[in-house]
Amino acid sequence: MRALAFALALATGAAVAHPPGAANDDPALRAEILAVREEIQKAVAAKDVRRLQQLYAETFTHTHGSGRIDGREQRIVSLLAGEPVIELAPVSEVAVRGHGGHTAILQARSPILNVKEQKYYDFRWMWVLVKEGGVWRVAASQATRLPDPPRDKP
């Protein structure tokens, strides 16, 4: 049955997901998008609310692994409060894809601390970024916890 579904998807031209780090990762775009991540980290370290507001689109939303949704201001509060967040976590399996010059998708994997358990869980997450006035801004993000067992440290 799975083989039939896959064959139908290919025959109809349906998209097949690319693995992280797929060949369509553009090095120049990747550098631009990772620079946004670095800017967010610098703004958090400097407690620069104004800069963080510039780096996130006004309509930004983040969907947590739990299903909870935060807006831009809630996300900035979480960042400045030192909560375990994807923006500040180490990353692996990074892939960046551009779409039409105005949109980019960053996908990665990160260990995130569960504060109550004091254990790290791996999350696969993504950002959707939009280019507004020549500047990349994070428009949306989502994190999904992977079924891997927790560990003490990443």
Image (cartoon, grey):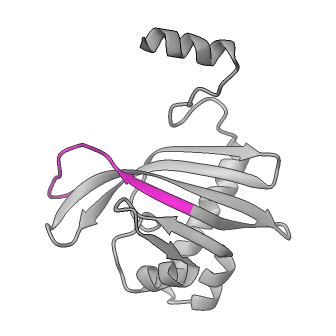
Q: Considering only vertical position in the picture, is 42 above or below 62?
A: below
Q: Quadrant of residue 8?
A: top right
Of 29 and 10, which appears nearest the observer? 10
Tell me, yes or no, if residue 97 can be seen here: yes
Q: Position of residue 80 (x, y in %)?
A: 44, 85
Q: Position of residue 6 (x, y in %)?
A: 53, 15
Tell me, yes or no, if residue 154 can be seen here: no
Q: Is residue 81 left or right of residue 106?
A: left
- The quarter in which the N terminus is drawn is top left
Q: What predominant SS class does the magenta segment belong to? A: loop
Q: Residue shown at 64%/38% (left/top)?
A: 25
- The quarter in which the C terminus is drawn is bottom left
Of 143 and 23, which appears nearest the observer? 143
Of 86 and 46, which appears nearest the observer? 86
Q: Residue shown at 57%/65% (left/top)?
A: 37
In this view, which residue lies farthest toward the right? Answer: 133
Q: Residue shown at 59%/26% (left/top)?
A: 16
Q: Considering only vertical position in the picture, is 77 above or below 39?
A: below
Q: Residue shown at 49%/78% (left/top)?
A: 75
Q: Is residue 30 left or right of residue 124?
A: right
Q: Identify the magenta region.
A: 141-153
Count of marks overlaid on the render: 0
**Does the stretch in magenta take in 62?**
no
In this view, which residue lies farthest toward the front? Answer: 1
Q: Position of residue 105 (x, y in %)?
A: 63, 50
Q: Quadrant of residue 55?
A: bottom right
Q: Position of residue 139 (x, y in %)?
A: 65, 66
Q: Is residue 15 left or right of residue 62?
A: right
